[in-house]
Image (cartoon, rainbow, N blue to C red):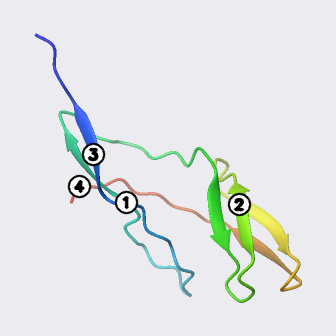
Amino acid sequence: MQRESTATIKTAPASYEQNSPAKAKNIIEIDCRGLEFTEFKADGEWEATGTDSGTKFTGIDLSEGEWFDYDEKAGEEVSIKDIKWEVRRA
C-alpha cells in the first residue's frame, strides 16, 4: 500500500516589516497531511524594499543567513542579518 502525503499553502506568504526590536512573525501557513516539516531553508531569490527610500532590491540570496547591499537613494548600507526560522505546529 502506497502512502500519500500532501502540503498545501493555507495563507499566502506575508511580508516581514522591520521592527525595533525585531519581532517574530508568521510568514506562511501550510496544511500538511501525512508529513511534517522539520527545517526551513531560505533557498531561492528574495525581495526587499528600503524602509525610508522605497528602493526595491531583488535577487536576494539568504542561504547564508545574511545579505548586505548599498541603497543609492538613501546613501546607506542596507542589510538583512541575524535571521532565525522556526517551524512549528499551529
Above or below, 47 relative to 22: above
Label 2 SS: strand
Q: Residue at x 69, y 51 (%)?
A: 61
Q: Quadrant of the rendered structure where residue 29 is?
A: bottom left
Type of the residue with mark 2: Thr
Type of the residue with mark 3: Thr
Above or below, 21 relative to 3: below
Label 4 SS: loop
Instruction: Give the label on residue 89, or none.
Output: 4
Label 1 SS: loop
Number of other residues with Cα within 10 Å of mark 2, as a class: few under 14, some 14 to 19, many 20 or more: few
Name the side, left or right, on which 76 lies relative to 44: right
- Front position in the image: 64 or 15: 15
C-alpha separation, residue under disc 2 versus residue under disc 4: 30 Å
Type of the residue with mark 4: Arg
- Front position in the image: 81 or 14: 14
Q: Residue at x 42, y 73 (%)?
A: 24
C-alpha separation, residue under disc 1 versus residue under disc 2: 20 Å
- Residue matched to label 3: 8
- Residue matched to label 1: 28
Above or below, 67 relative to 35: below
Type of the residue with mark 1: Ile
Name the side, left or right, on which 67 lies relative to 86: right
Task: First in sequence, mark 2 or 4: give its number.
Answer: 2
Tell me, yes or no, whether the two marked residues, 2 and 4, touch with CB atoms within 8 Å: no
Tell me, yes or no, whether the two marked residues, 1 and 4, touch with CB atoms within 8 Å: no
Task: First in sequence, mark 3 or 2: give its number.
Answer: 3
